[in-house]
Image (cartoon, grey):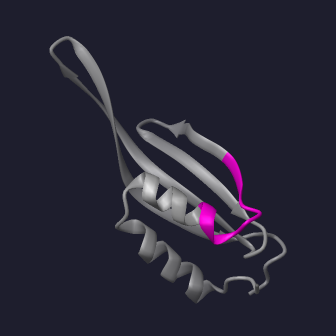
Amino acid sequence: MAYLNAEQRQKLVDDLKGMPFNKAKGKVRGMDENARLVYYRNSQGVGRWLTRFDLPTLGTRVTLVESHQDNAKNGKIKSEFDMAEVIAEALADNKS
């Protein structure tokens, strides 16, 4: 399969934006049989959790950005993650 160009990467971002996290994660992993999870819910900023996949066959890196908030209810803390942003960028080998 050929590498994704900028237009196809933007279409992928638009498709993933409206999905819940687990569905988006499954779609990304299913796109490339050689998909590699780079990191899962890595907190690199306050309130932002990143999950990144490399899709070497498609020449694309997809980052799912979630916002995180804790809700206290009856003395228990429940974490809620909401999909905030999707980033699709070309890998180094992808010149398209």
Across and down, in percent, residue 3 comes to 74, 83
> Which residue lies at the image location 43% right of the left edge and 75% below the top edge?
15
User: In the figure, is residue 48 to the left or right of 73?
Assistant: right
Across and down, in percent, residue 8 comes to 58, 85
Across and down, in percent, residue 49 comes to 49, 42
| Quadrant of residue 81 within the rendered picture | top left
Quarter of the C terminus within the rendering? bottom right
User: In the figure, is residue 51 to the left or right of 13?
Assistant: right
| Quadrant of residue 62 within the rendered picture | bottom right
Q: Taking 80 as reference, is 18 above or below it?
A: below
Examine the structure image and report whether residue 26 is included in the region drawn in magenta. no
Q: Taking 57 as reference, is 37 above or below it?
A: above
> Which residue lies at the image location 38% right of the left edge and 54% below the top edge?
83
Examine the structure image and report whether residue 33 is included in the region drawn in magenta. yes
Q: Taking 12 as reference, is 83 above or below it?
A: above
Region in magenta? 29-38
> Which residue lies at the image location 57% right of the left edge and 58% below the top edge?
63
Residue at the limit of the structure toward the right, as seen here = 93
User: In the figure, is residue 64 to the left or right of 29?
Assistant: left
Considering depth in this image, is 35 or 63 the residue closer to the camera?
A: 35
